[in-house]
Amino acid sequence: MKLAVIGTGYVGLVAGVCFAEAGNDVLCVDVDEAKLARLRAGELTIYEPGLEHLFARNLREERLHFTNDLATAVSHADIVFLALPTPQGESGEADLSYILGCARDIGGLLEKYSVVVTKSTVPVGTADKVRAAIDEAMQARGASVEFDVASNPEFLREGVAVEDFLKPERVVIGTDSARAEELLRELYHPFVLSGNPILVMDSRSAEITKYAANAMLAVRISFMNEIASLCEACDANVDFVRLGIGLDSRIGKRFLFAGTGYGGSCFPKDVSALVMTGREFDAPQRLSEATQQINQDQKKTLLPRIETHFDNDLIGKKFAVWGIAFKPNTDDIREAPALIIIDELVKRGATVSAYDAEAMPPAKRVLAPLGAAVHFAQNPYEACDEADALIIVTEWNSFRDPDWEQMRARLKNAVIFDGRNIYELETASNHGFTYYSIGRPTVRPQ
Ligand code: NAD
């Protein structure tokens, strides 16, 4: 099938590569010339496990191309996917300007039947707006070309995006057109050979499904973070509580880990957009509203412990920070809790020596305004050199089984503030550390 994917970011690039891998002829469009130049030269612009060899193979076998020319892409494609940004607008709503601007451009260009599919996360009612925008632009040029609109929200998780895309647990398609449904079923058939379902529904339900999924996950995280605070306040251990509830099949074990809060490009903006949509339709989303507030507070949860430990004086203190990406296996630092923690430490007069396995380049750009207060280390142990304590913010696998002796030798004090609970309490204390974590008792050296 001939496809166009408009927007070549995390979603568009992974989708483009994976669709090409299934044998489709994919033309990816972006307005970012620097990004296009790198991609055309065979250089990936994001870090995503497993993406590199698929990208290289499909470039080499010429099923994957990149252009800045929307007209070429529209005339090429049977299906046009919109994988454009839907950032948080000024009042917290989803900003649809990229989607609707592109829909208008497509309306100005369509010459043959196509399905225009929104893969971006968009609020309920967007499919109708996309259809209207295309129609309007078409009418303005006196054309009348048949087209369909569909919603196909994307559920991939950064860090395992390729696996998620190639073997989705479900594919959601929102459309009222049998023709569009047939094309999309054919396209997705190779991805659901193991028997996972393609769910076809009206576009409004498809649009809400995506927000409901992200908000539900965000609520679970925030719920556990509140339970963790209670555990801390009364000397209980959230690890036991997590297992105790997670083994109940009605609840399930996943997404029950307490930590320094969720970040990333999706949960924060999507929860916010859902809250705004609820207000618009007079159907308040109070759980999501509370979740937003809990998560904002949670990103700072390590700070009071750090301040108390150092007698409320962080001036001149140096902290090693392990992990900047909002989660492991990605270089994405959007809304990452580490950025807030680092900023707050610097505001209190401390300096930071930070290390991340993949996110150093974007972190250097974003943290540049903090100047010399933030040093970027070559490896996790260098970050510990002469630091007053270690703060763990992202649970990269490489941090899970560290060289404890080297850590102790390089740190000024054997103190860890762990925002992801990656060590057993006993292990940290047996290795001579004072170990603060989330929702668990603080332990001291044995
Ligand atoms: P991104 O910011 O990584 O990528 C967007 C791309 O669109 C950029 O490369 C940008 O240059 C390009 N672009 C902007 N305007 C353009 C235009 N007019 N024409 C062509 N290209 C243009 O965004 P993303 O993370 O891929 O997210 C895209 C959408 O998918 C969002 O709605 C997001 O909520 C949703 N989503 C993201 C994820 C995720 O994990 N990142 C998962 C599921 C859904």
Image (cartoon, rainbow, N blue to C red):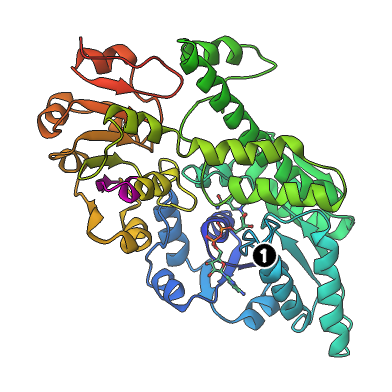
Examine the rendered structure and indicate whether residue 435 appears above or below residue 381. Answer: above
Q: Quadrant of residue 199?
A: top right
Q: Quadrant of residue 56?
A: bottom left
Q: Is residue 73 magenta?
A: no
Examine the rendered structure and indicate whether residue 73 appears above or below residue 54. Answer: below
Q: Specify start and end residues of the magenta stretch as a single range.
A: 345-355
Q: Nearer the viewer, residue 255 or 414?
A: 414
Q: Residue at x 59, y 47 (%)?
A: 268
Q: Residue furthest left?
A: 409
Examine the rendered structure and indicate whether residue 208 appears above or below residue 88. Answer: above
Q: Is residue 155 left or right of residue 322?
A: right
Q: Type of residue at label 1?
A: Leu
User: Where is residue 440 shown, x and y percent of the image?
Assistant: 42, 17
Residue behind mark 1? 82
Q: Residue furthest bottom?
A: 141
Q: Is residue 346 magenta?
A: yes
Q: Nearer the viewer, residue 9 or 114?
A: 9
Quarter containing the C terminus = top left
Examine the rendered structure and indicate whether residue 194 appears above or below residue 329. Answer: above
Q: Residue at x 36, y 29 (%)?
A: 305
Q: Residue at x 34, y 23 (%)?
A: 436
Residue 153 visible somewhere in the drawing: no
Q: How many other residues sit within 10 Å of disc 1, few (<14), some (14-19) or many (≥20)?
A: many
User: Where is residue 365 shown, x and y percent of the image?
Assistant: 35, 63
Quarter containing the N terminus = bottom right
Q: Quadrant of residue 441?
A: top left
Q: Residue furthest front?
A: 312
Under 8 Å from ligand 1: the CB of mark 1?
Answer: no
